[in-house]
Image (spheres, grey):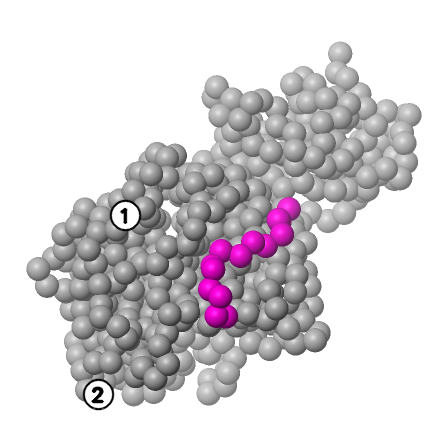
Amino acid sequence: MIDSFALALVLVAEPQAPPTRSAVTVDATGGSAYGQLAAASGGDFSGVLWVSGHLDGGRSGVYLSRSDGRGVDWADPIRLDGDPTGSVARIAGDALQVAGNGVYALWSDGRNAIPGNSVMESDLWLAVSTDGGATWGPERRLDPGLHKPFSVMESTFAVDSLGTADPADDHLLVAALLATAGGSELRFLASRDGGRHWEPPRPMAAGAADVRMSVDGPRVHLLWSEHHGFDHQWLYQRSEDGGRHWLPQPVPITQRSPEVLTGAGAVAAEGPVVAVAWTEHGATGLGPVLRVRVSGDGGRHFGVPTLVGNYPAGRAAVRSPTLLVDRGTTVAAWSDNRAALDQDFFQAFAAASRDLGHTWFESPLSPGEGREVQFARGGPERSQLVAVWTTSLFQGHVEASISRDGGLHWSPGFRVNDRPDHVLLARVAWNARYDNAVVAWLGVNSIQRIRSMAGGFRPQWVHPEGFLTPGGIGWFSIGGFPRRDEGLPFGVLISAGTGHWGPAHGFRDTGLLHDPLLEGSYRLLQQGALNGTVLPGGIGTTPPLTIPPALARGKPLFCAAVAWGSAGRPGALTDVVEFALN
């Protein structure tokens, strides 16, 4: 006989987008610096890194707030730097990295600057946690191997965990672009033991203007631009062994030309597929266009430059290209003003190519304005991709879209932030343990202070359905589950509150309270009353459930759905959804 318990649902429309979480202000003072934000997530860690100028009596500092892999509850911020001078600190979008139990933060500041030098000096600094961000060791200055004065213009950071959970095995890789009295120098720095010791810095290029890096296991791919008088050029370098050895000479990606633009380049790699992108003036010399070259042999040979996008080339202007490679598919994103030529109205678009850049399939991302697209993905065994962008620079907000097929098709854009703040910049990180997008952004509040915020969502969702009264009928529907879960069983768990329950040791935190209601729903799930099958398209429903006549009205309930495979292997897990009892 199937157990019964009190349950009532409200008849509401099925969601058109996954539920997003309420925003959390991680920098409670509202003193975050413009443009300085990073986010990372992995395992049971999520973190937001920012630069603040209002904590600690007004001094600039580097701060971190952490959460678990769900990104739901955020701890009070801690300061990572020890700069006593309050000099200006800067971080890049990839400045926070997580690999197993190791968490790493990279920044630059000018605490050691000598007044009167011809270059506004700054140094690179690193902070390391070996226990998932719970505690942090002392900061460490990284030596790029240059005589002072120099200043850190730009840096890009990646970590290769080698597949172990021991931070002592992590390889830390940094490409730093440094301004010197004589111009600029691009240096590559590497540590093979989690940041304790560093190899001698390697000079990569003189006169570089921008640098991008993509790391795929031991393979390191660098892209940078150079100025040659009025001409500009993008160049590529590759290492197959984590930066120990490189090609004898960099590979020219573009010709030297005044039409080639610096400041807007991208590189992405996975396995044998390597893609590079840049912008250049069109044939008319007017609006910039997006060009992409793709290699199918690990960067040894690249295809011809391809114009990507269905905008009127030479009339529309392309901005902020980004790239991602997922299981052989190259995905590009950008913003352009095709809908309002000669105006500052930009929309976000994506395009995917499955044939090494020969043909592209374009999809709109933003329903309205869209700028500065950021990608995140679930990993090689997952087909889910997430794109996040901001809308207008003033009075803007954060929007997102989801692809279940590696970037060929995208969901309608939906809003992520639930605050009225004017969003300036957004970052996104993916947590594979929870199939979860953690989103951070900078928002300007009503008193014109910049605040660091955090929120997020899971692409998969569960939804209670049916107009239920005592003795009525109800069920649960699911949607957005990844393709890898299609054909798997799923179940719905119900509780009277939120908590941290997992059905077995090491299982993920469902977010539900362990109470009699949850135990009753777990028994119903085992008996087939609260489960179903994930169908093609990532959808499914549970069987209709009769509600007992004895029903406590007005009581909120909380539910989550999870898919599982053979031997109890968990599939995707939804966020907790609260629904009302009537």
Q: Quadrant of residue 501?
A: top right
Q: Which residue is mark 2?
A: 230
Instruction: Please report the residue visible at 17 percent of the width from the left and 50 percent of the height from the top.
Output: 244
Instruction: Please report the residue visible at 35 percent of the width from the left and 77 percent of the height from the top.
Output: 114
Say the numbered circle drawn on residue 367.
Answer: none
Dot 1 falls on a residue whose secondary structure is loop
Mark 2 packing: few (<14 Cα in 10 Å), some, or many (20+)? Answer: few
Q: Position of residue 264 (x, y in %)?
A: 34, 72
389 to the left or right of 279: right
Instruction: Depth check: give the residue in front, 516 or 582.
Output: 516
Q: Position of residue 498 (x, y in %)?
A: 72, 37
Closer to the camera: disc 2 or disc 1?
Answer: 1
Instruction: Please report the residue visible at 52 percent of the width from the left and 39 percent of the height from the top.
Output: 44
Residue 216 showing in the rendered view: no
Q: Choose the circle earlier in sequence order: 2 or 1.
A: 1
Instruction: Please report the residue visible at 72 percent of the width from the left and 22 percent of the height from the top.
Output: 519
Q: Is residue 548 above or below residue 339?
A: above
Residue 490 showing in the rendered view: yes
Q: Quadrant of residue 507?
A: top right
> Magenta segment range?
73-86
Hey, what amino acid is under mark 1?
Answer: His
237 to the left or right of 516: left
Q: Are marks 2 and 1 in contact (CB under 8 Å)?
A: no
Q: Position of residue 466 (x, y in %)?
A: 78, 38
Say the numbered circle drawn on residue 197.
Answer: 1
Magenta-drawn stretch, dominant element (helix, strand or loop):
loop
Mark 1 packing: few (<14 Cα in 10 Å), some, or many (20+)? Answer: few
Dot 2 falls on a residue whose secondary structure is loop
